[in-house]
Amino acid sequence: KAGVTQTPRYLIKTRGQQVTLSCSPISGHRSVSWYQQTPGQGLQFLFEYFSETQRNKGNFPGRFSGRQFSNSRSEMNVSTLELGDSALYLCASSLVASGGRNYEQYFGPGTRLTVT
Amino acid sequence: AQSVTQPDIHITVSEGASLELRCNYSYGATPYLFWYVQSPGQGLQLLLKYFSGDTLVQGIKGFEAEFKRSQSSFNLRKPSVHWSDAAEYFCAVGATSGTYKYIFGTGTRLKVLA
């Protein structure tokens, strides 16, 4: 079974631009979560989608948004990019929604975003 | 509040030596517990997980972890480290009730000496 895939793997953007990252979960998984990883802040939870609905949201500004499609694929969008948005963005998928019995996440390789 | 502490930022061991990475959590009930490994430039790979039952959990790549409720710990162990184990290791805690949170520790970077 194929793992979680993320595209693109690397991205360079300029301040003020916007960016869209894509995540395809493991086949059959309906929950997709997004994380931001930086050396200073570590792994921080952005949001979780399950069956096209946002279930949980972390403490990030409204510039960060996401959505999930009927095939469980998810996109994350960051508008008006700032230098501090440079990070590795990780997507994780799960068979069940968070809080469900035996909830566990499987991660993709990440998208490395550099904002200049 | 739910939290995870990995007290060791860096650990260096010789190849063939045993390894123990520490993880302490704070949570009002028994949480779900996980260990992940991340190689440079890669995503996180699930090593093992604890949901309930036997407190000694076996994972992939020869790793094991023991849940100790009295110490609020879930330490990761390996009897003999290989050079390929050099990576960053993250402990994570998943709440089992209330508003769900899945929180990661700050990670422990493992260096293996040949």
Image: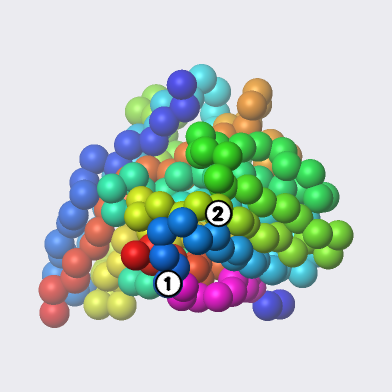
Q: Nearer the viewer, residue B100 or A13?
A: A13
Query: Quarter of the image containing the C terminus of chain B?
Result: bottom left
Q: Is residue A8 magenta?
A: yes
Pick whichever of labels 2 and 1 is earlier in the sequence.
1
Label 2 sits on a secondary structure element that is strand
Q: Which residue is mark 2?
A: A78
Position of A78 with respect to A25 (left or right) is left
Kindly identify which numbered label has been placed on residue A12. 1
* Image position of B114 (left or right of A30): left
- Asked if residue B87 lies in the magenta stretch, the reply is no
Q: Is residue B65 left or right of residue B9?
A: right
Q: Magenta segment, which residues?
A: A3-11
Q: Tell me residue A7's x, y (percent).
A: 59, 74
- In the displayed structure, would residue A109 be above or below residue A72? below
Residue at 27% x, 70% y: name it. B86
Indicate the position of residue A81 as horizontal and vertical percent values: 46, 55
Measured Cα–Cα span from mark 2 to mark 1: 13 Å
Chain ID, mark 2: A
Q: Position of residue B13 (x, y in %)?
A: 16, 64
The quadrant in which residue A32 appears is bottom right
Quadrant of res B101: top right
Residue A14 versus residue B43: which sits nearer the camera?
Answer: A14
Tell me the amino acid under the disc marked 2. Val
